[in-house]
Amino acid sequence: MTASTSVAAGTEEALRPHAEETFAAELAALAAADDRPRPARWKLSPWAVATYLLGGTLPDGTVVTPKYVGPRRIVEVAVTTLATDRALLLLGVPGTAKTWVSEHLAAAVSGDSTLLVQGTAGTPEEAIRYGWNYAQLLTHGPSRQALVHSPVMRAMAEGRIARVEELTRIPADVQDTLITILSEKTLPIPELGTEQQAVRGFNLIATANDRDRGVNELSSALRRRFNTVVLPLPASAEDEVEIVARRVAQIGRGLDLPAAPRGADEIRRVVTVFRELRSGVTEDGRTKLKSPSGTLSTAEAISVVTSGLALAAHFGDGVLRAPDVAAGILGAVVRDPAADRLIWQEYLETIVRERDGWKDFYRACREVSS
């Protein structure tokens, strides 16, 4: 087996291929149909990048599936920011598709979404700047050959998009290593008396969680280097159901799970429960509710439905039903065993129990809650 064959086989077997691999046909069709001006080193024009994220039909009949369901202006502002000298900060509560949008923006602009720094409390400066190959360093001293390029440094050298996930989880002193990179578009290498300058096409997308502000708040100097785009929760239940159904279908295909002929009913129920408890009011606006401590985001709804589909596939008849999602909902809602359990039981008894057509759902949830 040749090296190229091995790589191809590995891609086919990947549990979650990168966006540029999964949607390669759509990206190729967009590139072929795209006759608009493109910024330096961009694979597509800003218009085509927005079409890739929002979906549409091309002149040759190719259907581009939506990757993001939400206000068009948000996507247009995000894409336009990347065509300027400002970095992009995607801000929002958990589950608003920040990482998803970041990945697809990088895939459409650079054809490569893998130049990624994952932010954690232990992320060191080397993850953003550069490190050293210590064998080379000890043998030959500081040199270009001994440098280990970070994803950001590689993006600067190649004119691509770098991604920094969960920026506010990174310690403040490490965050600030981005200031010179974003303002001067250069990365000093004092050990070598040189620098890495960013070539045209370079930019950076960072994501940050609204709930994490105050953990490692961004300095005003760093925040000024970003254009901030806030990603909202889905505006309507229909939008959220569409998002959950599409992502569950994509994940299910990757896991070889069957499509659920009656799954749409359970998806709508999960979304309804999450939206009502999240907002603190029922769908009809008549009854106020207590909200549990969890975020109950769209991402968690996707996880609940995917787990339910796996249960239906492996321990049922492949059809998604209320008992398949009940345990997942309980786990998502009840994070604080004392307070959240009371909120959940009150919601079951006062809302779910009295709702027409939800008797099976009520019984399933009561069974796993007892």
Image: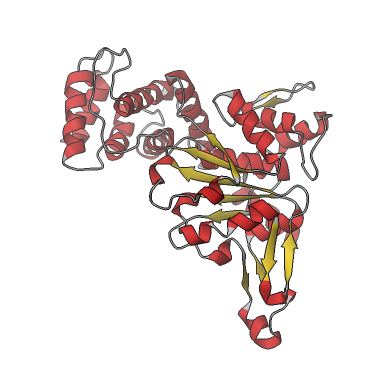
Q: Left of 190 or right of it: where is 320?
A: left
- How many marks do you count on the picture? 0
Question: Please, is residue 204 above or below residue 94 in the view?
Answer: below
Q: Is residue 138 above or below residue 61?
A: below
Horizontal arrangement in the rendering, residue 236 relative to residue 113 (left or right): left
> Between residues 53 and 146, which one lies in front from this camera angle?
146
Query: Residue 195 location in percent, x, y?
Result: 73, 66
Above or below 331: residue 157: below
Percent position (x, y) of residue 77?
A: 63, 31
- Examine the image and state in which quarter residue 103 appears: top right
Quadrant, the C terminus: top left
Between 234 and 3, the one lying in front of the other is 234
Which of the 4 image quadrants contains residue 317? top left
Question: Which residue is the extreme one toward the front?
Answer: 221
**Viewer-side residue, 78 vs 247:** 78
Q: Residue at x 67, y 81 (%)?
A: 136
In the displayed structure, does residue 294 sit left or right of residue 146?
Answer: left
